[in-house]
Image: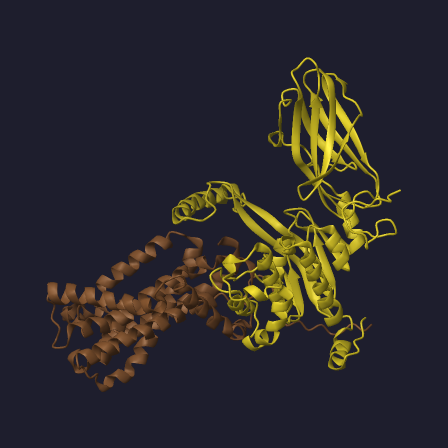
Amino acid sequence: MVEQVEEFDLIVEPGRSAKNYWNDIWRFRELFVFLAWRDILVRYKQTVIGLAWSLIRPFLTMIVFTVVFGKVAKLDAQGVPYAILVYAAMLPWQFFSTSFSDASNSLLTNSNMLTKIYFPRLIIPASTVIVNFIDFLISFVIMIGLMIWYHFVPPLTIIFLPLFLILALLTSMGAGLYIAVLNVKYRDFKYIVPFVVQFGMYISPVGWSSNVVPEKWRLLYSMNPMVGVIDGFRWCILGGESQIYIPGLLISIGLTLCILVFGIWYFRKMEKTFADII
Amino acid sequence: MVFQENGKNFCRYNLELIMNTVIKVENVGKSYIIRHQGQSSYVALRDVIADKVKGTLHRSKSLVTKSPVINAPGKEEFWALNDVSFEVQQGDRIGIIGRNGAGKSTLLKVLSRITEPTVGRISTKGRIASLLEVGTGFHPELTGRENIYLNGAVLGMHRAEIKNKFDEIVSFSEVEKFLDTPVKRYSSGMYVRLAFAVAAYLESEILIVDEVLAVGDLQFQKKCLGKMEDISQTEGRTVLFVSHNMGTINQLCNKGILLKNGRISDIGSTSDIVRTYMKSGSANGKIDRSSVSGTLVADIEFTEVLINGIDSNDIYISPSSEIKILVKGICKSELEYYRTGITILNDGVKLFSLHNCPEPVPIKKGPFIAEFNIPKYVLRPGDYALSIFGHDNGNNRKGNEWIYGNEILTFSILEEWDTINDSHNEGLININYQ
C-alpha cells in the first residue's frame, strides 16, 4: 500500500479561527430557512385562529396607542391621521424589539442543539430575525389597510423604505448577537432585556414625533439608533410633513454599523465556548 | 481492501482506499475549570465582579510570593481529555470504550467540532456527521415528515438530498403510519428510529455515533448495527462508535480505543481492547445500604458483591466461562436458620435463584462470605441484573424474616458464538450447556 500525501480539509486547533467559516455558513444556508420555518410553524400550533394572531396583535397595539396618545394625551399629529403616524413608527419598533429580544434568547432556547451538533452558531440568532421579518411583512398589510381606510396616498419617498428596514434589521441583529452571547454566560441578561425593550420604547419616538425634542438635544437624542430608523420610516410613509434630520441619521447609521461589527466579532470570539458554558 | 464491482463506485473507492488517513488526532487535550465555591453552575455577574476583586488581591499577593495565579480560590483545572493521539483510516470502524467519565463523550464532541480542544490539533478529511443524541433539533410540535426535513438540515443536508432519500428514511424508520403526527405523540422507540434513520442516510464520509441506540428495541438495534456495518463496509465510510455494550462493539468495530481518565490506555483490535477493559474493573461493587431493605437489616449487612473476582458495577463475561459470584457481608446478631441467595434477572424478569446451601444453617456473629456458581454457557448473550437476599426461618422469631437487595449489580454476557452458544438459538438460556 502506498502512503498518500495527506490533504486534510479541516484542521481544528485552539485559537485557530476556521478559515472556511463563511463557507460553512453558506453550506448551511438552508438551515436558516428551516429554522425560521420551524419557528413560524410552531408558533401558532394548537391555536384556534392560527396565523390570524400575527395580524390581530399589531392591530390591537395600534388601537391602544392611537387611543392613549392621540385621544387621551392629544399629541400633535401634524395633519396626518394619528393612527398612521403611530403605526409608521410602531412597525419598525415592533420589528426591532421582537427580533432583538428573540435573538438574545435564541441561543438559550436552542441550547440542546448547541451542545450536540456542529453548525455555524450565527445561524440561530440570524434565523430568529428572519422570522420577525416575516411578521413585519404581515403587519405591513395592516398599514396598507389603514392607508386605504383614511384615503391616504403615500408620497414617492416610500421607495426608500427598504433602506430603513435594513437599518432596523442590522441594528437588532448587532445588538441581539451581543446580548445573546452575554446571555449564554450571564443569565442576568434574561431579565435585563425585557426592561431595555420597554424602556427603549419610551425613549424612542414611537408615540410622538421626534420634532418635539428641542433642537439642541437632537444630536444627543440620535445616539439611540432606533431614532434614525423610526424617523426614516415616518419620512418615507408620511412624506414632507416630517422632515428627516440628516446628521442624526448619519450618527444612527454609524452606530448601527459599529454595533453590528462588534457584535459579530464578539460572537465569533465566544462561539467556541458556547457548548462548554451554556 | 474492498473492491467494489458496481460501476462508478469502483473507480472512486479504488482511488481512495489506498491507506487513507481521514482523521488525525495529535496530542489533544481538553480542560475544564471546575468551581468548588458556590452552588450555581452558571456565572452570575455578581460572582464575576467579586472574583475580579479577589483575583486582583490574589495576583498582587502572588507577585510577592510568586505562586501561580491559576490556583485562584475555589477553582480547579480538570483535564477531561489529556494527550490523546490516534489516526483513523478510511473505512475503519472504531469502537471507543471506557468507564463513565473516561472522556468518551468529550472526545466525540471535540471530534465533531462542538467544542474546541484546549491543546492539540485535529485534522479531518471529508464531511463529518455526528449523532450524539437522539433527535437533536427535533421539535416535538412538528410532524414526523417536518422533522425529517428539519433534522436533515441541522445535520447539514440539502433539501434536494433529503427529498431523494425521504422514502428510504421513512421505510427504514418504520413510522409510515405516523408521518403526519406530531413527534410529541411518538413512543420513545419511534422517536429513536426516525432520528437514526435521518442520520444514517446522511451522505457523510465520517459518522460519529454516541450511545444512542440503547433506547430502541432489540430488533431495531440490530437493524441499525447492520446499517452501520453496511455504511462502513460497502460504502467505505468511517464510523466512530461509543457504547457500553461490549457485544455491540465486538460485532461492529474492527478497532478499539480504550480511554481511562481522559487518556488513551490501549488501542488495538476490538477483541483485545474489550478483554482489557473487562479485566480493568475498579472497586465500586460495594453495596449501598439504602438499596437493601427487609426485617433483617439490623442483623445482616451485605457489604460487597464480586463477580469472577471483579467487584465492579458493569462486567462483561464470556459465555464460555463459569460465573463465580461472592457475596460478602457481616452478621451482627446470631441467627439459627439462615441462608443467603441470589436471583438473576433479565429486563425485570426473574430467571432463577441460587442459595449458598441447600438448607438453612446457624450463622455466627462476624463477617461471612456466600459463594455461588453459575455453570458456563447457561446464560446466553445479553444484559442481566443480580439481586441478593437472605432468609431466616428461626424459631426464635415469629415467621419468616428477610432481607432483600433488588438489582444490586448488572453484568453482560458477551456475544461470542460457538457450537454450544449457537447464534441461531433463541432465548436467554442454553439447555445443552454441558
| Left or right of B339, for residue B199 | left
Task: Tell me the quarter of the picture where residue A215 sits.
Answer: bottom left
| Left or right of A170, for residue A19 | right
Q: Please, which colouring scheme is shown?
A: by chain
| Left or right of B226, for residue B432 | right
Residue, far bottom: A156
Comparing A2 with B70, the one in front is A2
Comparing B302 with B51, the one in front is B302
In the rendered image, the vertical position of residue A197 relative to residue A237, given as above or below: above
Instruction: Please state the horizontal and vertical placement of residue A79, each as a whole percent of the image.
Output: 11, 77
Task: Tell me the quarter of the picture where residue A6 sits.
Answer: bottom right
Instruction: Please state the horizontal and vertical placement of residue A273, each as a whole percent of the image.
Output: 51, 58
- The answer to whether residue B132 is visible is no
Q: Residue at x 44, y 58 (%)?
A: A109
- The answer to whether residue B244 is visible is yes
On the rendered image, what quadrant is the C terminus of chain B found in? top right
Instruction: Please state the horizontal and vertical placement of residue B92, each as a whole percent of the image.
Output: 74, 64
Q: How many marks?
A: 0
On the rendered image, what quadrant is the N terminus of chain B found in? bottom right
In the rendered image, the vertical position of residue B118 relative to residue A168, given as above or below: above
In the rendered image, the vertical position of residue A84 relative to residue A72, given as above or below: below
Q: Colour of chain B?
A: yellow
Q: Residue at x 30, y 77 (%)?
A: A164
Q: Colour of chain A?
A: brown
Instruction: Please state the horizontal and vertical placement of residue B153, each as a whole percent of the image.
Output: 54, 70
Task: Tell me the quarter of the picture where residue B9 sits.
Answer: bottom right
In the rendered image, the vertical position of residue B389 relative to residue B94, given as above or below: above
Residue, far top: B396
